[in-house]
Image: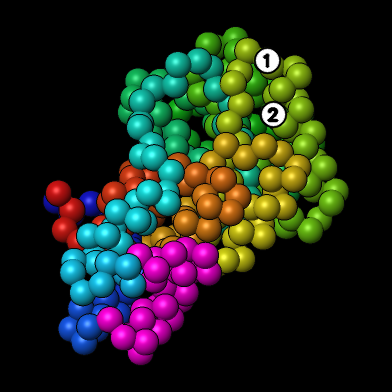
Amino acid sequence: MLHKLFDALARTRSGLAKAFQILAGEGISDQSLETLEEQLLMADMGVDMVESTLEVIRKQGSSDFMAAVEDHLIKMLPEKLETEPLGEPTAVLMVGVNGTGKTTTAAKLASLYQSMGQKVMLVAADTYRAAAVEQLKIWAGRAGCELVCNEQTREPSAVLFDGLQSAHAQKADVVIVDTAGRLHTYDNLMSELEKMFRVVEKRFPMFKQKNLITMDASLGQNSLIQAREFGKHISLSGAILTKLDGTARGGIVFSLYRQLNIPVHYVGVGENLMDLEPFDPVVYVHGLLGRPVS
């Protein structure tokens, strides 16, 4: 069965595969390298990654440059994320700008941990978006996990506090907190996020904290600006790349890791509850290049 991550990179792969075919057929020339460079940039791999990849091809010459490119790209990515039960109680804050799919991704992540036998609780701390709680109630039901919410307050830190108290009392293994989408340019909302971070850190030290930023893959290099600014306010453990199956700009993983040291932990590959794939650098690179997946 073809890997879902491989499938999700179809749009990105189409342009790259054609450029590599031209390079293999016509040989390495200034024109063929220029065509490839254009496609790599359009895939949002970032200028530094594009230049280093072209240099690998020039050094390799007319021999099997594809294998050399593959090895080079894999080395430039974070290691494979091993999906295993968390060894200690963990609070996962889902952060990001509006429209990146935090709520559905939170439910997908909850379902993933539940499938590993962990006790999972969802906390609806998005107190701004209309119907956000109702949406998460539906997803929590599908995932089969408990939801903590309070529709009588607009204070997300209060909802977070209640959720973590409940999770501690019930000995939950994982608490996944759906926060409101916020533009990184809104200082008051970013300060609010810092407050939530401190609530976990200072009031609930029994929970290890992970902060995951959801990022729309179709935004490409613009996502770097968002991640950089969020990282100034809270420590980001990693990223979840959403909507990868709907874009040709799937190369953003490189820039996130090389420039900001933010590894992609998961990739959204569809709309269903099970459509969340742990990031695998080998499958990812194979998906970019159209190489067979073993």
The percent coordinates of residue 268 (x first, y second) are 41, 52
User: Dot 2 lies on which element?
Assistant: helix
The percent coordinates of residue 112 (x first, y second) are 38, 34
Residue shown at the point (64%, 24%) measured from the top left: 163
The percent coordinates of residue 86 (x first, y second) are 44, 21
> Is 3 on the left or on the right of 107, as rendered?
left
What residue is pinned by disc 2?
Answer: 160
Front-lying residue, 41 or 274: 41
- The image quarter containing residue 27 is bottom left
> Is 152 on the left or on the right of 170, as rendered?
right
Label 1 vs label 2, nearer the camera = 1
**Residue 16 in view, yes or no:** yes
Q: Main secondary structure of the magenta part?
A: helix
What residue is pinned by disc 1?
Answer: 205
Front-lying residue, 154 or 205: 205
The percent coordinates of residue 91 (x first, y second) are 58, 26
Front-lying residue, 53 or 14: 53
Residue lying farthest to the bottom in this orientation: 31
- The image quarter containing residue 145 is top left
**The residue stretch that appears in magenta:** 28-56
**Residue 278 in view, yes or no:** no
Q: Compared to 229, does 80 lie above or below?
A: above
Residue shown at the point (39%, 22%) measured from the top left: 85
Residue shown at the point (43%, 81%) measured from the top left: 38
Q: CA distance from mark 1 to mark 2?
A: 14 Å
